[in-house]
Amino acid sequence: MSEAENTRCGFVALIGAPNAGKSTLMNALVGAKVTIVSRKVQTTRALVRGIALEGDAQIIFVDTPGIFAPKRRLDRAMVTSAWGGAGDADVIALLVDVRKGITEEVEAILEKLPAARAPKVLVLNKVDSIDRPRLLKLAADLNAKGQFAETFMISALKGDGLDVLRQKLAGMMKPGPWLYPEDQVSDAPLRSLAAEITREKLFERLHDELPYESTVETELWKEQPDGSARVEQTIFVAREGQKKIVIGDGGRTIKAIGTAARKEIMEAAETKIHLFLFVKVRENWSDDPERYRQMGLDYPRE
């Protein structure tokens, strides 16, 4: 989309164990909310792209699902998606939560990383949470296990170290035209982001009570004559008991979820939103190929 002759453009895949802080980092680097953040692990299910500009470079960040040992069909689809995103990238950024260090999940990623051809950088996150000697030892241990072109020490939540990270990554992008308009921050359709925002609020409210067998789909996005939009979304759960939990006594829970979601959807859409939430039971939805297509995932065959 850029007409400049000296522009750069490329893809950076953010990979790591669940809850390493990839989504928080993506939003901070892009400067806008493009992917949901939750303390519930494995919240990101499919590849989410966020677009940042740094000088003459357009960096397309790919937030991948956390890489872990898959047990269910949905798990396998998420892990396959994560490695697919890494394989297609120009640069792979391994994000490690320094408080957890080299876990089994990080070890497993390190073992598979050499198979990816792209240059790799190490990003140590939450560096303000441990002492410096321990941090330096962790950096040395990780570099001994992997071939990283650069090591960055950041706090995605506080923004520390992000300017240097973005500048260095911009320098690693290949010469070429920009792929997106300069004011675009994500390639996700607004209705998809809206569904993800509601799913985030669902997890925030019910993280201890609602398992992963829940998803949100935007069924209707209708522009109104006054410029506002009517948005209808359905929350799908696996069992009748879960439906009652989502609705809550007298509908209080779903009302609170809707209020929180509507506020963020309005910010993303930059217009007034009338949000209507419905809850339906869809048993065994995680075995339905159509649901995987809706989430942007390939359906893993047994």
Image (tube, grey):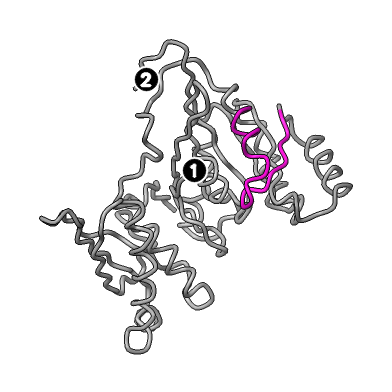
Q: Quadrant of the N terminus?
A: top left
- Name the residue: 72% across, 46% down: 107
Q: Count neighbours of disc 2 (C-alpha within 10 A) and say few if under 14, some if 14 to 19, many if 20 or more.
A: some
Report x, y in % for residue 185. Answer: 41, 39
Q: Position of residue 170 (x, y in %)?
A: 56, 26
**Badge 2 element:** loop
Q: Which residue in the protein does label 1 denote?
A: 31
Q: Is residue 27 magenta?
A: no
Residue 159 is covered by the magenta coloring? yes
Q: Which of the labelled discs sits on residue 79, or is there none?
A: none
Dot 1: element: loop
Q: Mark 1: give few (<14), some (14-19) or many (20+) Cα within 10 Å.
A: some
Outermost top residue = 5
The residue stretch that appears in magenta: 150-168
Who's the residue at 54% across and 45% down the image?
A: 28
Query: In the image, is 176 to the left or to the right of 216?
Result: right
Kind of residue at disc 1: Gly
Across and down, in percent, residue 192 comes to: 33, 52
Q: Quadrant of residue 29?
A: top right
Amino acid carrying label 2: it is Ser
Circle number at residue 2: 2
Residue sitting at x 43%, y 47%: 34
Expressed as whole percent of the image width and height from the top left, the position of residue 26 reads 53, 44
Closer to us: 54 or 152: 54
